[in-house]
Image (cartoon, helix red, strand yellow):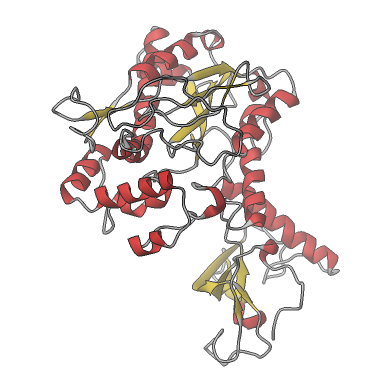
Amino acid sequence: MSLPENRPVAGDCSRPIRLTGHVDHVDVATGEVRRAFISSDQPGGVLHVRCNNRRASVCPSCSTVYKRDARRLVLAGLAGGKGVTDTVVEHPAWFVTLTAPSFGPVHSRRQQGGKSGPVRACHPRRGTCRHGRPAGCHERHHAEDSRLGSPLCADCYGYGRTVVWNALVPKLWKATRDATESAVAAAAGLTVAGLRRAARLSFVKVAEMQARGVVHLHVVVRVDGPDGPDSAPPGWADGDLVADALRGVIGSVAVPAPDPDAGTLDATAPEDGWSVRWGVQVDIRRIALDGPTDVSRVSNYLAKYITKSAAAGGALDHPVRSLAALGRLVLAPHVRRLVETCWRLGHDPAFTAALDAALGRDSGDVPRLVRWAHQMGFGGHWLTKSRRYSTTFGALRTVRRVWSRTLGAVLSGRVPVDAFGRLDGDPATVAVGEWVYAGRGLYGGNTDPPDGAAGSGADVWLAGP
């Protein structure tokens, strides 16, 4: 049994995951077990499920769904809905952009007066660097210039510090969160314990990979009452106290780190290492929640970064397994050198141990920088949030899954019930699944697979692009 031609599978996913197994329904009261679903009844003997990849270059369908869910997650924390009370719109919130420091001058497109203004010269400087290359660039780059983000002199650029900074961004963000809570408490005349009894700081954070190969963070910070979005924040939170405390923390917080470029870039680096800090370009703006347009603008702005790839064209959408595999990829010289730097530093046992110590956790079997070389060393999550900010991806997917099953049952003229005849979702029934990974791609064979060997013999498995 093969899939009908043009039949959408797993929401039209480009690279669906194939699973074999079954789902049993268990009666909570009696413990009786009944088989509700088995994959052997499906084409090819497998169940196709979404890959749920966020990157548009890997799977456009799943990327669209992920982006929509991310928008709903952010929107619910600002305007309510999805289990969050509507009164949250009255809670003070700020939009914060945290950037990386400079690791050397790069080609950039600068416009006077914002994105609609005239383009200025890239780096209007004279002279040469110590390697004999021009210290400036007088061109006015267009938006699609392939040189954007690449250094004016690759030998002057701090590639080692770049990948280490990316690797330590999660630790730097945690230090920022902890220090912000202490700073807000001090400014409000409270202890940290007292602050937690009076207010709660909630956030959602999105990471964006810049053209120069470093991560920037876009964060929404919201102040709630002690019980989260259901409780009103204290009166002092409505002023500039939180923003001023956050601004002071961002300018001072630092995480000690091993310096991979010590002795090669400058002679003033401290002997005991180097500290990872935020860049000087920091933007903190109060979110004016005057209507749905303002809220949607923020949520759309954050959601658009979720589906971006680390490198243009999606060449680095998957881990780089070897230097030979890296050599076969079509990459810009700057991006290639960042990946090579991750491999070089990752295979230095002493440096890997020092980096693990800075992060406070062990790399495991594969050195951290090698594992995340395809992301220029960044191994954090692209979207994270505090527990009480809003709903979760899992909750959104569960609602969509129930709605899909219900709609399918209604269109086929039946009532959606479980194996015991109860309405789907009845708390008296618990679903227990047992699944085994069987591969990726669509089953496209014209013959039934042999017993116990789904996908073998004359079957054809269609991998996604």
**Horizontal and vertical percent for residue 421?**
72, 69
**Horizontal and vertical percent for residue 119?**
61, 23
Q: How many marks?
A: 0
Residue 322 visible, this orientation: no
Q: Nearer the viewer, residue 259 or 232?
A: 259
Give me the residue at 23% from left, 53% from top.
Answer: 347
Q: Which image quadrant: the N terminus?
A: bottom right
Compared with residue 351, is residue 273 higher up or lower down, i.e. above or below? above
Give me the residue at 29% from left, 33% from top.
Answer: 131
Q: Which image quadrant: the C terminus?
A: bottom right
**Horizontal and vertical percent for residue 309?**
53, 48
Q: Residue furthest left?
A: 271
Q: Quadrant of residue 445?
A: bottom right
Compared with residue 62, is residue 456 higher up or lower down, i.e. above or below? below
Q: Nearer the viewer, residue 131 or 275?
A: 131
Q: Quadrant of residue 248?
A: top left
**Horizontal and vertical percent for residue 123?**
47, 23
Q: Quadrant of residue 175?
A: top left
67 sits left or right of 227 in the view? right
Residue 19 visible, this orientation: yes
Give me the residue at 53% from left, 42% from top.
Answer: 146
Compared with residue 68, is residue 408 higher up or lower down, i.e. above or below? below
Give me the residue at 71% from left, 79% from top.
Answer: 3
Compared with residue 4, is residue 136 higher up or lower down, i.e. above or below? above
